[in-house]
Amino acid sequence: MSKNKSSESVKVVVRCRPLSRKEESNGPAGGIVQMDLRLGQVILRNPRAPPSEPQKTFTFDAVYDANSKQRELYDESVRPLIDSVLGGFNGTIFAYGQTGTGKTYTMQGAWLDPERRGVIPNAFDHIFTHISRSQSDKQYLVRASYLEIYREEVRDLLDPNHGNARALELRENPDTGVYVQDLTSCVCKSIKEIEEVMNVGNQARAVGATDMNEHSSRSHALFLITVECSQPGPDGRKHIRVGRLNLVDLAGSERQAKTGVQGERLKEAAKINLSLSALGNVISALADGRSGHVPYRDSKLTRLLQDSLGGNAKTVMVATLGPAPQHYDETLTTLRYANRAKNIQNQPRVNEDPKDALLREFQREIARLRAQLNHRKWRSKQKSEQVEDESWDGDQEKEIEDEEDEEVEKEGEDYMKLEEQRLEREKEAIRGDQDLIPDEKQKLLGEKERMMVDLRKEQEATEQLTAKYKAMESKLLVGGKNIIDHTNEQQKMLEIKRQEIAEQTRKEREIQQQVLIQDEETLELRETFTSLQQEVEAKTKKLKKLYAKLQAIKVEIKDVNDEHVRSRQELEQTQNELTRELKFKYLIIENFIPPEEKNKIMNRLVFDPEEDQWKFQSLVPAESKSSQMKKRPASAVGYKRPISQYARVAIAMGGHSRYRAENIMFLELDMTPPNTASVDCSKDGEPNQSPSVDSSPTKEKGVRKSQSWCQTPKSMTSSPSNVSLAACHTATPAAAHGRLTDFSVRPTAGTQTHHHHLC
Ligand code: ADP
Ligand code: MG
């Protein structure tokens, strides 16, 4: 699977947009951003600092100033990446920067103006032009998806009911990494189709938002393109390479003001930039290289871009800046952020023959449909041979396989027509035949009619199959076929030349940057001094240079410290507010919710790390289990409720009444003579010694009673539960009577006197 495995760093380019008209009218201060295109450097001036303070310089892979053209940026910095994607690598481009600095302009631009088309439309052109120019043994399948992440919820922008669609979940696949479950993905055959996909998504984005400006500055938009390419390898088998391209327009990187926000709104505000701050943390952790843990799981965005940052992908980051002095802080933050991202190392590799390639499925399905169609044709031909014994060739199937699709279809149609005509002719013949008796004629005609209906059904089925086959096949793009008609040789040459120039510029810049670094390091080695004076001068110059550098770094350290303190204060403030809210909720819970209710709820709560939320465990177990629950547990077969082994034995033994499942009391009338009669109060003073407990009439009665009870419902004895119950009754007369007699023979002193009187 892995090929060309090597490490390469994230490419970072910076682009500065021109001063807007409003900014120009604000004052003569001009921009604070200067760019050295040759060296790839950005020089930032602090408008509030004294002129003596050194300016900040950052070096990047490329920089684009206010006069830069969309095409330049594409050819130099994006084209190589898209080429890699077409070769089976994963690729990511993301635009990072403050709102209004040109992220969307860079990614999308003005579609209709060829000069101002952004990265995405240019990538569409690039991909489909590449396909149309590739060799004809290559087959391609291009798919596109479009989603946005807003308040940590992933939404499908191609879903027709996007507005009320539920948030999608992220899943992880050990082979292909993190993906969005149930995300719509459209197979695109041409530039027009993929542009349509983009438009549909953009409209969904605009419709879903009440305030488009705010929405777009707070949500991340991801356009995903998957290019699968199948090509016969040296082993003769078709190999598939899959390149995935993520085109990401991030939310505005400006700090969200949190002051004065409370409760729900505070949490919301915290969520809005969660993905972005998590992205910052991921970049820091990766750039640092020391910390082992990279917090990808902290947000949806970082999980989705996991491969693009430090994983299997080639990544380009376009940091956008505004030149206005009032945004100095944000601009500096963006530059620092971008500077850090340069240090991230990725390990891109070609994705070869992945298990889930859709192209493979398509190829299989097409082959299956084709085989079905051929079989159908072959069968009809066989049939017609049987009927008319016409001159069809022997080895039909093989011959048909070699035929072109159109011929297959045409022949099929011809055959159907012939068959229909033949049946008509036969019907006519039957009608005209005088020898047949009317009954028989009718029967034969009916038969022919049925054959006609069958034939038509067959024809319809074949047509459907053919349509499906064609639809599937049309989705696969074959190299060499002209998808774009306007490309001619001249244009092709022009493009190649432009690419060469872009390549040249890139190389030149790289060399310049290297020379600069070497200069600093080896200056003194190369210098030979003719006199002491000269040496002093040279060294003083060097000292000054180094001193300036030292000062710059000192300022940098102070800045970073300040920023750190500021963000810590902000975090503490947020924490304080959340703690206050927590205390409030605690107060309510502790004082107004009964503890048992609270415990019930607490016991049912479980934390779902996927969704980062507490959830109630359902009372009824999941569906698969519910049917099990309805079944009688093994311990209760034949009993009304689960019953222990001990209780079962106790029932069988006629033990205590508590082990009886029902009829724990006899409610029939007790016909024994009142045993109060036998208490001789006058004789002795021991009324508790009841002589009737063991008196024979009661015992007999008890036995008889239980027998009669046992005998009456004959049918019931078949059930084991009844058997055991009956057994229990027969065996427990003594106990029952013991209790009955207890009632009557436990007189207190008072009742005793009373009985006596009664007597
Ligand atoms: P973002 O998406 O970063 O919020 P936009 O792309 O919407 O910013 O840009 C804001 C405005 O600036 C738009 O009107 C856009 O046309 C203009 N703009 C941005 N970058 C450039 C550029 N490089 N050249 C000319 N105009 C630009
Ligand atoms: Mg935007």
Image (cartoon, helix red, strand yellow):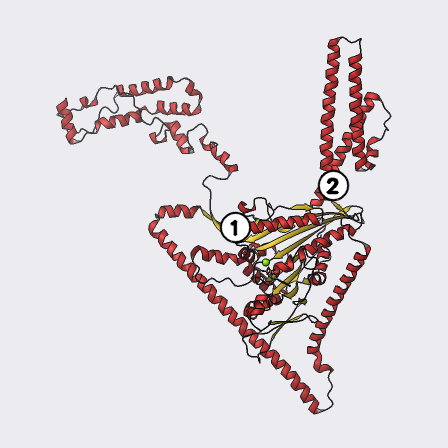
Whether residue 188 is visible, yes or no, is yes
- Count of residue discs: 2
The image quadrant where one finds the C terminus is top left
Above-or-below relation of 469 to 230: above
| Residue 523 located left or right of residue 589 | right
**Residue occupying image coordinates x 71% and y 36%:** 468
Q: Nearer the viewer, mark 1 or mark 2?
A: 2
Say which quarter of the image contains residue 300: bottom right
Say which quarter of the image contains residue 667: top left
What residue did someone put label 1 on? 611
For mark 1, give the secondary structure: loop
- Rendered image: mark on residue 709: none
Query: Does ligand 2 reach within 8 Å of label 1's beta carbon?
Result: no
Amino acid type at circle 2 is: Glu
Q: CA distance from mark 1 to mark 2?
A: 40 Å
| Residue 490 located left or right of residue 8 | right
| Residue 192 located left or right of residue 379 | left
**Residue occupying image coordinates x 70% and y 48%:** 192
- At which x and y percent is residue 519? 70, 77
For mark 2, give the secondary structure: helix
**Residue occupying image coordinates x 79% and y 17%:** 426
| Residue 285 located left or right of residue 654 | right
Of residues 664 and 494, the one nearer the viewer is 494
- At which x and y percent is residue 613? 49, 51
Whether residue 306 is visible, yes or no, is no
Categorize mark 1 by other alpha carbons within 10 Å: few (<14), some (14-19), many (20+): few
Of residues 37 and 364, the one nearer the viewer is 37
- At which x and y percent is residue 757? 12, 24
Counting residues from the start of the chain, the first of labels 1 and 2 encountered is 2
Amino acid type at circle 1 is: Glu
What residue did someone put label 2 on? 473
